[in-house]
Amino acid sequence: MEKIYTPEMAAEVLLVSTLTLRKWLRSGQLPGFKLGRQWRIRESDLKNFLDQTSNGVKKTG
């Protein structure tokens, strides 16, 4: 079974604030889903996001 992260856990992995991570979730930059009112992030989505980032900041172009 795939690991599921809370925004707080994912923010620690990505070295960003929880506020920034939630902004990425709301904008769709980071795929996630809501479980009730709480955001959750799949491990595979987090790994894919990390592959597209450098030092926690999304690459452009």
Image (spheres, helix red, strand yellow):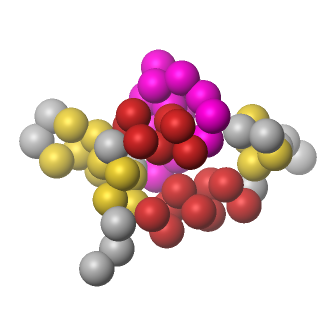
Q: Which residues are magenta?
A: 14-31
Number of numbered discs present? Answer: 0
Nearer to us in this view, 1 or 38 = 1
Image position of 48 with respect to 31: above or below: below
Main secondary-structure element of the magenta-colored stretch: helix
Across and down, in percent, residue 2 comes to: 34, 74
Nearer to us in this view, 8 or 35 = 8
Image position of 50 with respect to 13: above or below: below
- Residue 26 seen by the camera: no
Measuring 29% from the left and 40% from the top, which residue is drawn there?
39
Across and down, in percent, residue 9 comes to: 41, 42
Measuring 39% from the left and 61% from the top, which residue is drawn there?
42
Across and down, in percent, residue 38 comes to: 21, 37
- Residue 5 seen by the camera: yes
Which quarter of the picture shows residue 25? top left
Measuring 10% from the left and 42% from the top, which residue is drawn there?
36
Left or right for 7, reference 12: left
Question: Any magenta on residue 19?
Answer: yes
Nearer to us in this view, 39 or 6 = 6
Image position of 47 with respect to 19: above or below: below
Viewport quadrant of the N terminus: bottom left
Across and down, in percent, residue 24 comes to: 52, 34
